[in-house]
Every structure is written in C-alpha cells, then in structure tokens.
C-alpha cells in the first residue's frame, strides 16, 4: 500500500509540475470603450473592431501558440468609471495589456493606472497630447490634436478661403479644448481672424447664447471641434440663427448619428479624420469589406483605429515572444507596421506620425475630399 501511495504522490507531483509549466492557455487582453453614454457609437465601433482583429489572429493560431481572449469593459465615457474598470482589468482580471480607450478624458484617467502597474496601453483614438505624456507604457494609434487642429485651420483658411472664423467648444473636455486651441493658433498664424472664441459647459444642449454672439460677428466659417451629438445640435441651432457658412470639426464628428440628428444642417460641412472608406489601398478595402460583412455597416474611423490598435498590440506581443509588460512595451516602441490608417512607427513620445483626411458631408453621406500629410 505504501508503494502505491508513493507512486500516486509522485504522479500527482508530475501532473502538477506539467500544469504549472504549461501556464495559461489564453492570453488575456483588456479592451476599454464607451458602449453606453454620450459616445456609445464610438465604443460599439471599437469593440466590434477589437473582436474582429482577435478572431482573425485566433483563426491563424493565436499568438505565441495561445488563443487571445478579449476582456472588455464599458467606461461609459466617464473618467471615474474609466479608472474603476482599468483598475479591475489589471488588479483582478490580470490582463497583460490594454487596448483603449476612445475619449481622451477617460484615457487620461486610465493611463496612470497602466503606467504604475507596468501594463502596456494603446489608445485607438485619444488625440490629446497629454495621454502619452503619462509615461513610457502608454501609446496611441491615432494622430494628435496639434496636427488635427492645424489641418482644420489650414483647410478652412486655404481651401474654404475663410478669413474670419468663430470657434465653439466644450470647455470641460480636453479633446475639444485642445482642438480649439490648436485651430486658433494656426488660423491666426496663417493670417485669419478668430472673431469669437466661445466655450460651453459639458452636457449643454442649448448653444444659442454663444452662437448668437458668434453669428453677430459674421464669420466665414464656424469651427466646432466637439463630439457628434453636440456638433449636430450646434449646426441646427447655428442654421436657425441664420449662419449659412461651412462648419468644420474634428474626428469626433465621425458617427452616423451626426446626420441622423443634424439632418440638412450638417450638409456641406467638413471634418478631419483618420481614414476614409473610399481610400483605394487594398488593406483599406479588405477591411471595409470584412467589417461590413460581419456587422452590416460601413466601418467608421473609430472601427479602423480600434482594429489597428489591436493589431499593433498583438503584433508587438508576437515579436516580444513574452507577455510581460516591459517586453511588450519595448516591442511596441519598435513597431513598423502597415495598418488600415497608414504605416505606423512611433516617435519618441509613442505617438504615430500619420496623415489626416478631410471628409465632407454631402447628401447625407461622408465624401472624401483630400489627404493632408504631416
């Protein structure tokens, strides 16, 4: 009996050691985005894209011989909620990296948590420069606000021939404020005049007090660098007050709900963006075709950047050959990858140097106008 007991004990030890040496059978990646709240369409697009990218990698064998699993959390577009879900993903769920989030104000809440824990993070769409300044574990897949605001100013002044501009922005949102500031700086540098520069409180739905002051100055263009729900209402109210000129915005406009809410008020308006579905590059058209087949709609820039961000992260893990944070971080820094929104290499601040496109709203549809290189 003692011999059998010893054999059983040895067998249990061998099995235990085998189980320990094999490690987890999955690589757990955190995903964060606002699938509820004011920017819900953005969160849904990015979540769809995360899932699509992961499914494609898993179909080809995963990464490092393991399948990838997405652990997704809804940040509701709220920094406090964002901090909570980032903490849970890292401390409780033990993700090896995080792809997210969409809104700069929420990324600024989550990034310090990732940095402190040594967990690599790549935001698909947070354009505020402060996001990657948090530390060396923080990356992004999108261009940043100084470039986007500059492009908006150059397009307004040079292409639209607008010499006077009014600016209206959400004063409680880092993204909106940043774009407004960079637009104003470049526009005045070009020789244009900002006739009125107005802020409003987050959550406002009546912008007529600010718009009345702006319209009274007879601007040639209105720069409204906010999120689609606000911008659609701003366009409607500006038209009601008699403003007939073009309205220009940033990538926060990129939602089908912009036209649903704004209707004819957003016709012949323009916004800067990260990609166009009309780009003829094969990688873009392949992505558009696959996304449309899977989800029944044309992917917006949020989907393109969500797909890119996840592919950048998984490519880095593959090249790292390990799943510890420092190894993934170092591999991310060395990225040189062709993705839907362009060729990605990171600068010293872990920001990609990329082109921007300008999109027009015509007959209720997004129409590609031009590409602007950095």
Image (spheres, rainbow, N blue to C red):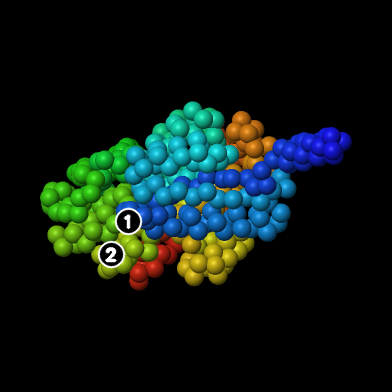
Which residue shows up at 23% across the image and 56% down it? Answer: 234
Q: Classify residue 1 as left or right of residue 91.
A: right
Whether residue 194 is visible: no
**Circle 1: element type:** helix
Which residue shows up at 60% across the image and 33% down it? Answer: 325
User: Which residue is nearer to you in this view: 201 or 276?
Assistant: 201
Q: Position of residue 294 (x, y in %)?
A: 54, 67
User: Which residue is nearer to you in this view: 118 or 167?
Assistant: 118
User: Which residue is nearer to you in this view: 367 or 295?
Assistant: 295
In space, the residues marked 1 and 2 are separated at their CA atoms by 9 Å
Looking at the rendered structure, which numbered label has been put on residue 55? none
Q: Residues within 10 Å of mark 2 (few under 14, many from 20)?
A: some
Q: Which image quarter is the N terminus in?
A: top right
Which residue shows up at 57% across the image and 58% down it? Answer: 52
Against 356, residue 360 (above or below) is: below
Against 114, residue 306 (above or below) is: below
Circle nearer the N terminus (1, 2) = 1
Q: Position of residue 223 (x, y in %)?
A: 28, 50
Determine which residue is flagged by label 2: 261
Q: Quadrant of residue 83?
A: top left
Q: Looking at the image, do the residues carrying marks 1 and 2 touch, with CB atoms under 8 Å apart?
A: yes
Looking at the rendered structure, which numbered label has been put on residue 228? 1
Residue at the front extreme?
A: 1
**Circle 2: element type:** helix
Q: Position of residue 201 (x, y in %)?
A: 21, 44
User: Which residue is nearer to you in this view: 326 or 167?
Assistant: 326
Q: Quadrant of residue 14?
A: top right
Against 309, residue 5 (above or below) is: above
């Amino acid at each position: 009996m003692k011999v059998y007991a010893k054999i059983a004990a040895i067998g249990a030890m061998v099995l235990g050691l085998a189980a320990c040496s094999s490690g987890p059978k999955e690589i757990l990646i955190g995903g964060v985005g606002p699938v509820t709240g004011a920017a819900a369409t953005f969160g849904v697009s990015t979540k769809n894209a995360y899932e699509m990218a992961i499914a494609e990698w898993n179909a080809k064998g995963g990464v490092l011989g393991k399948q990838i699993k997405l652990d997704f959390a809804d940040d509701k577009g709220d920094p406090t909620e964002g901090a909570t879900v980032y903490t849970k993903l890292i401390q409780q769920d033990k993700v090896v990296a995080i792809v997210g989030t969409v809104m700069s104000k929420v990324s600024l809440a989550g990034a310090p948590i990732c940095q402190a824990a040594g967990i690599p993070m790549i935001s698909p769409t947070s354009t505020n420069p402060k996001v990657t300044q948090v530390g060396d574990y923080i990356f992004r897949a999108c261009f940043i606000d100084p470039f986007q605001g500059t492009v908006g100013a150059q397009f307004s002044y040079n292409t639209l021939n607008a010499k006077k501009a009014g600016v209206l922005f959400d004063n409680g949102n880092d993204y909106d404020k940043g774009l407004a500031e960079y637009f104003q700086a470049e526009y005045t540098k070009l020789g244009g005049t900002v006739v009125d520069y107005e802020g409003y409180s987050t959550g406002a739905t009546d912008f007529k007090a600010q718009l009345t002051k702006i319209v009274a100055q007879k601007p040639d263009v209105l720069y409204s660098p906010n999120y689609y729900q606000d911008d659609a209402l701003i366009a409607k109210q500006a038209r009601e007050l008699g403003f007939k000129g073009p309205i220009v915005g940033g990538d926060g406009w990129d939602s089908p709900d912009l036209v649903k809410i704004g209707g004819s008020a957003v016709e012949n308006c323009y916004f800067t963006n990260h990609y166009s579905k009309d780009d003829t590059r094969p990688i873009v058209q392949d992505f558009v075709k696959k996304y449309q087949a899977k989800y029944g709609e044309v992917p917006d820039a949020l989907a393109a950047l969500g797909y890119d961000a996840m592919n950048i992260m998984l490519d880095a893990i593959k090249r790292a050959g390990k799943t510890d944070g420092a190894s993934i971080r170092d591999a991310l820094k060395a990225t040189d990858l062709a993705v839907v929104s362009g060729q990605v290499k990171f600068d010293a601040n872990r920001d990609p140097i990329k082109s921007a496109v300008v999109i027009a709203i015509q007959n209720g549809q997004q129409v590609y106008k031009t590409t602007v290189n950095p």
